[in-house]
Image (spheres, grey):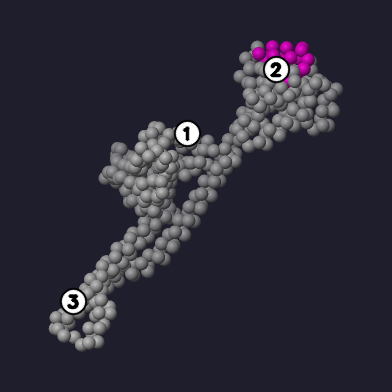
Amino acid sequence: MAKILAIVADTVTFQVVQELLGQEGHQVRVVSDDKEGLDLAREVSPDAIICDGTSPQINFLEVCRLLKADSLRDSFASRELAAAYFILLTTPEQFDEVQELDAPFDDFLFKPIVKQELLARVRASKRSRELRAQLALTQQELQLSRERMLQTEKMSSLGELVSGIAHEINNPITFIYSNLTHVQSYATDLIELLRLYQQELVVPGAEIQQKQQDMDVEFVLDDLLKIVSSMRTGSDRIRQIILSLQDFSRSDRSGWQLFDVSDGLENTLLLLQHRLPAREGRRDIKVMKEFGNLPQIECYAGLLNQAFLNIINHAIDVLEESAQELAELESIKFKPVILITTQVVDAERISIEIADNDMAISKDITAQLSEPFLVAPPAEPPIYSGLALSYQIIVEQHKGELRCFSEPGKGTKIYIEIPLRHS
C-alpha cells in the first residue's frame, strides 16, 4: 500500500481523506498547514501528496515550488521526494485559473471528493511511481552500458597501443639479449688470452706496466664478466616484461581462444610487481601462490587478464588502506598477504581464489558485484567499478561465477569459477 500525505485545512475534507484512504489500507498522514506538510514530506518521502488548493491557509504553489527545489538537491531522499505524485484538490470554477498558472502538479481532483475518483488517483500515483522508478533504472542501465562500451573500447585501444610498443621494444632488446651471449663468450676468450700474455711476458715494458697500474687491470678482468652477466640478467628481465605485456594485451579479435590461466595470473603479478615492495607505513605485500595443474580454458584471454588485474589491484588497495589504519597501533605488526589458489572443480570448470588478510572492517561488496547498478548513485564515481567490470567479464561474458566472502578482521576472498569451454 502507498504512503500518502494530505495537506488539507477544512475539517470535512480532512476526515473524508483520512477515512477513505485508511479503509483501503494506505498509510495516511494528514496535516492542516503547508509548512508542517513540507517538513513531514521531507521526513517520510510519501508516494503521493494530496494538497488542497481551495483553502486560503494553504499556498499549494509554494508547496509545489519548494518540492521542486528539493528535487534538485543531489541526495537519495531528495530524489525520492521528487518522485512523489502531486494531486491537487480544486473546484471546477478554480481549475481554469490554476491551469493558467501552469502549476507543476501531476493530477487533480474536484471537490467534493468522490471515493472512486480518489482511489483512482491513488492507483495512478502508484503506477506513476513504478514507471518513474523503471525509467530511472533503465537510464542507469543505459549509462552503465555506455560506460562499459567506452571502457571496452578504451581497453581495446590501450591493448593495441601497449602491444605495438612492446613489439617495437622487443626487437632491439632481443638483439641486445642475443648478442650478450656472444659478448660474454668473447670477453672470456680475451681474458684467457690476456692471462697467457701475462704468463709469457714476465717483465713487460714500462709503458705496459704504467697502463696496468692506471686501469687496475686485475679489477677490470674480475669485474668485466660480472658486468656482462648483470646486463644479461637485466635484459632478460626486460624481455620477460615485454613478453608479459604482449600476452596480457593480446587482441581478442580472433574471438574465443585457448588460454593458460596460470600464465595469465603470473603475467598479471609481473605487471603489478611495482606495487608490492614496502612503502612508508606498510611492509612488503607477500604474494603466495598455490596453483593446481589446470587445463587450458577457452575464453577471451585479454578480458580475463583485465579481470584478474582489477581484482588483485583491489586486494592491494585494501591492504594499503588496512596498513594505514593500523599504522598508529604499534602493538600490531601487520604483514599484508595475498593468497592466490587455483584448482580443477570438475570436468567442466576450474576455480580461482584471490584472498587478502585485510585486518580492518571489511566492506560488504557482494551487493555491488551482483548488482552493478547499485555501485554508486549516478552523480557519484563508482567505488568498485573495477570489480563490477570483472563481474561483467566473468559472469556475463564467460558464463562463470564470481562471489565475495568477507569477514571483519580476517580479510576478503573473491571466488571465481570459469567453464573450460565456451558453449
Q: Decide: marks 2, 3 in contact (CB < 8 A)? A: no
Q: Residue at x 71, y 15 (%)?
A: 17
Mark positioned earlier in the residue sequence (1 or 3): 3
Q: What secondary structure is marked by label 2?
A: strand
Q: What secondary structure is marked by label 1?
A: helix
> Label 3 is placed on what type of residue?
Glu
The answer, for residue 161, to whether it is visible in the render is yes
Front label number (1 vs 3) = 3
> Label 1 is placed on what type of residue?
Ala
Marking on residue 169: none
Mark positioned earlier in the residue sequence (2 or 3): 2
Q: Range of the magenta residues?
A: 7-22
- Of the 4 image quadrants, the one containing the C terminus is top left
Q: Is residue 411 left or right of residue 128?
A: left
- Of the 4 image quadrants, the one containing the N terminus is top right
- Quadrant of res 209: bottom left
Q: Is residue 15 above or below residue 355?
A: above
**Residue under pointer 2:** 30
Q: Is residue 34 left or right of residue 155?
A: right
Label 2 to label 3: alpha-carbon separation: 104 Å
Q: Position of residue 258 (x, y in %)?
A: 35, 50
> Label 2 is placed on what type of residue?
Val
- For the stretch drawn in magenta, what is the main secondary structure? helix
Front label number (1 vs 2) = 2
Label 1 to label 2: alpha-carbon separation: 37 Å
- Quadrant of res 378: top right
Neighbour tally class for label 3: few under 14, some 14-19, many 20 plus, Cα within 10 Å: few
Q: Residue at x 36, y 58 (%)?
A: 241
**Residue under pointer 1:** 367
Q: Is residue 423 magenta?
A: no
**Residue under pointer 3:** 192
